[in-house]
Image: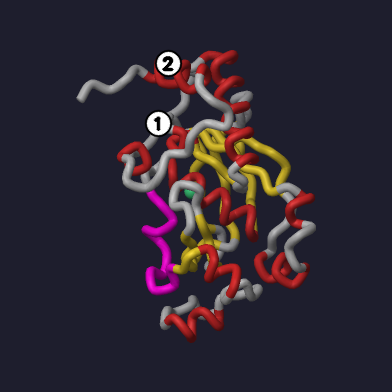
Amino acid sequence: MPTTPLLDLVDALLAGPSPAPIVTAGDPVLRRRGEPYEGQLGDERLDGLLGLMRTTMREAPGVGLAAPQIGIPLRIAVLEDRAEILRNVPAETLHARRRVPQPFRVLVNPRYEAVGPGVAAFYEGCLSVPGWQAVTARHERILLRGQDETGRELDEEVEGWPARIVQHETDHLDGMLYLDRAEIRSLSTSAHVLGRWADPTPENASRALGFPLPQA
Ligand code: ZN
């Protein structure tokens, strides 16, 4: 099957609806490694794509979106965890998950490595796997490298929930879904997560559903 050239793909997307349709699990674009971004789009098209990604993430709503999730095989992701949404989350939950507001930001060619042995396991979901969540262990602290949308080099430590978002989005660019790392016995519909497993930590879910949690 011939593949559509990248610029045509982006132009078609920018000419289409906003928010853009989100690609769901089963589409091969979510299983391929994205191409490194090296200026292929030019500034104007890149701005257009980032604006569309931001709108699509916010409308979903989600806290991150990787370009392959709207069908673009490039190593670009956006993330944002807005304070006004966190106001509706119980303080105990925010504290346990180390979830703090994240301003909108763009990751270009991101990569990460663990800093220290700490691991945190919580329910996690993905806009490309709608309706489901599973407990996924993530590094608590990472070193994030790559660039931002202006080409500025990133070299910073990220921890807590923001580190989870960075790991989730960067994994998308390597063709991975969170389910590849999740405790599959924890898999629950979003309705069950809301109704039964909304505790700050997944210990009750671990006992009731029979999956291990990392040792503290
Ligand atoms: Zn995702």
Vertical order, 81 against 117 (above or below): above
Please say whether residue 178 is one of the residues in the magenta stretch.
yes
Residue assigned mark 1: 73
Q: Nearer the viewer, residue 89 or 190?
A: 190
The range drawn in magenta is 176-187
Indicate the quadrant containing the N terminus: top left, top right, bottom left or bottom right: top left
At 48% across and 22% down in the image, what residue appears? 13
Q: Nearer the viewer, residue 50 or 111?
A: 50
Residue assigned mark 2: 7
User: Is ligand 1 less than 8 Å from the beta carbon at label 1?
Assistant: no
The amino acid beneath tag 1 is: Pro
Q: For the image shown, how many numbered marks are present on the structure?
A: 2
Residue 154, given in percent of the width and then of the height, sits at: 61, 37
Q: Is residue 120 visible in the rendered structure shown here?
A: no
Left or right, 41 with reference to 100 = left
Residue 73, given in percent of the width and then of the height, sits at: 40, 31
Vertical order, 184 against 30 (above or below): below
How many neighbours does mark 1 have within 10 angstroms: few (below 14), some (14-19), or many (20 or more)? many
Indicate the quadrant containing the C terminus: top left, top right, bottom left or bottom right: bottom right
